[in-house]
Image: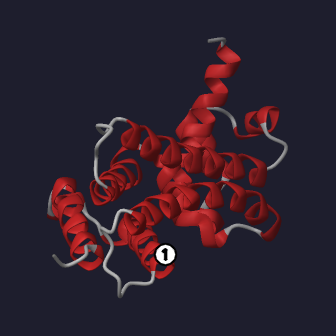
Amino acid sequence: MRKSARTRERILAAAAQILSRKGWAGTRLVDVAEVAAVQAPAVYYYWSSREELLAEVVTVGQRATHAHVVASLEALPAGAGALERIDRAIAAHLEVVLDRSDFALAAIRNAAQLPADIRERQLVGQREYADVWRGLVEDAVAAGELTADVDARAARMLVLGALNTAPEWWNPERGPLADVVATTQHVVRRGLARRR
């Protein structure tokens, strides 16, 4: 990788780190440049504006979450049940957002803060990710694994909403990520599974 490309990646990673912690309004290019160890004007060599840089961070974060969840689902055995697939998607989502990617965390934390024009562009990726979850819930309905008294759409939206708020309250000093994953899976499974 050329030096220019490495510098661009370093700035992008610094922007993800700052954006994930300080939010859209609190992310300043001078802070990004400091973390990336470049002069602030260097950012404009790669991006025309602060908004363009931060929009790319959010896009990369959306793609990271989507790709990690899909790859985790594809790694399951062919005969995995619908609720087992939902369990795996829950784990993958929490892993990438809480532990593996400042980009994913930045995308989740800033979705509601995006300016309208950027928000419109980001909705495309958000809908694609929602389609993954729609498929998981529809598969559970088709397999008879979802309880009949649950609205499938509401269930999907509530699960995604809960997963997306985890960064606001989870603290690794209060307990391991594995415990949060297991608890979330338990709560979702108990709420969705058909009583036998």
144 lies left or right of 38? left
- Disc 1 secondary structure class: helix
Q: Residue at x 65, y 14 (%)?
A: 3
**Residue underneath mark 1:** 157
**In front: 100, or 12?**
100
From this view, report whether residue 4 is shown above or below residue 43. Answer: above
193 lies left or right of 120? left
- Within 10 Å of disc 1 (Cα), the crowding (few <14, some 14-19, many 20+) is some
Residue 141 placed where, x, y %?
A: 40, 69
43 lies left or right of 132? right
Give amino acid for label 1: Met
**How many numbered discs sit on the rendered protein?**
1
| In the image, farthest residue toward the top | 2
Residue 190 placed where, x, y %?
A: 21, 75
Q: Residue at x 78, y 64 (%)?
A: 120
148 lies left or right of 176? right
Q: Is residue 17 visible?
A: no
From this view, report whether residue 12 is shown above or below residue 182. Answer: above
Residue 75 placed where, x, y %?
A: 34, 35
**In front: 159, or 58?**
159
**In front: 135, or 43?**
135
From this view, report whether residue 130 is shown above or below residue 59. Answer: below
The quadrant of the rendering that contains the N terminus is top right
Residue 49 placed where, x, y %?
A: 81, 49
Q: Quadrant of residue 129?
A: bottom right
Q: Is residue 32 visible?
A: yes
**In front: 29, or 94?**
94
